Amino acid sequence: MSGVEIRELEAFLALAQELHFGRAGERLYVTQSRVSQLLRSLESRIGAPLVERTSRRVSLTPLGESFLAGLRPAYDALRATVDEARAAARGAGGELRIGFQGTVDGQLARAIARFGDRYPDCAVDIVEIPLSDPFGPLRRREVDCAVVLLPVAEEDLVLGPVFSRQPQTLAVSVHHPFAARDSLSAEELADCRLIGIDGGAPGYWRRAQAPELTPGGLPVPAGPGVNTLQEGLSLAAADRGAMLLCRSTADDHGRRDSLAFVPVHGLPDSELGLVRPRLRPSAQAEAFALAMSRETAGTEA
């Protein structure tokens, strides 16, 4: 690669994410001038600018955009290979902290067991994370990886594998008019108040869990916002609104005395994904991602 150093590539990736030399330096624990030096070295090797710099902004050149699109998956694959080898050499000792939303389904439980069999010296801690903050625990390094509801479009996080694709279900009070129905169409969500999610989750993520419009464009009335799954189920049971859930979560929380769970047709399926930091993921998290990939291989449509 004409002497390209991995640190030059990491500097470019951090700068492409932050579009700010100072913040890129903070991400890499180096000075702003060191980021600039590494970028100049990389551009010299390539033979053209990758970044446009002005006094007010930083942006990628067309070549920089193209280079980023090809580099990111290659870099992620390289880091995963190195981290897997490191984990195998060390026996993946230490601790793996896995965050999850909702319930631990069968695939996740089997992947945890697979990981434990291969790396018996690694302690596994499973931590429930709130619906209202799906990515915060990762960024604060409270967990090494997290199983969260999709979509995930965070540039500083790596998504994969994706699993547990299931139809969506509406949780309503047994006193709600929908409770006696066998199923609903997505357009009928316009006739109920949909419980949303509060907190710091990105807007695109919150709208995916509680749509503001039906697929046909009808407005969906907004119900109360919650921070946790249990809060949402309690409000639904009290007939304060209705909450969309994946089918397995509905099955696991089947309090039939107070809640009814009605399948909804016409919405995208619910999916879970394993998420971990893009830069400097732990060896344990990379090894677990591999175990999860092997568990889900061939099981999804």
Image (cartoon, rainbow, N blue to C red):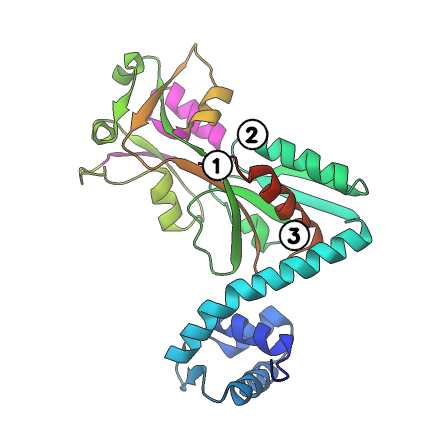
Q: Is residue 232 magenta?
A: yes
Q: Earlier in the sequence, mark 1 or mark 3?
A: 3
Number of the label disc, if any, that sits on residue 96: none
Q: Earlier in the sequence, mark 2 or mark 1?
A: 2
Query: Cα distance, mark 2 to mark 1?
Result: 14 Å
Residue 281 horizontal/vertical position (percent): 64, 57
Number of the label disc, if any, that sits on residue 300: 1
Residue 65 horizontal/vertical position (percent): 41, 73
Marks 2 and 3 close (CB-CB < 8 Å): no
- Hey, what amino acid is under mark 2? Asp
At numbered mark 3, what does the secondary structure look like: helix, strand or loop?
Answer: helix
**Residue 267 image-quadrant placement:** top left
Locate residue 213 relative to residue 166 in the image: left or right: left
Q: What residue did someone put label 2 on?
A: 105
**Residue 45 image-quadrant placement:** bottom right
Locate residue 282 relative to residue 212 in the image: left or right: right
Residue lying furthest top in this view?
Answer: 257
**Label 1: few (<14), some or many (≥20) within 10 Å?**
few
If the image is split into quadrants, where does the N terminus sit?
A: bottom right
Q: Start and end of the magenta stretch?
A: 220-245
Marks 1 and 3 close (CB-CB < 8 Å): no
Q: What residue did someone put label 3 on?
A: 286
Comparing 82 with 139, the one in front is: 82
Q: Is residue 173 among what the camera can see?
A: yes
Q: Is residue 183 magenta?
A: no
Pair 2/1: label in front: 1
Q: From the viewer's perspective, is residue 11 above or below residue 286?
A: below
Query: Cα distance, mark 2 to mark 3?
Result: 20 Å
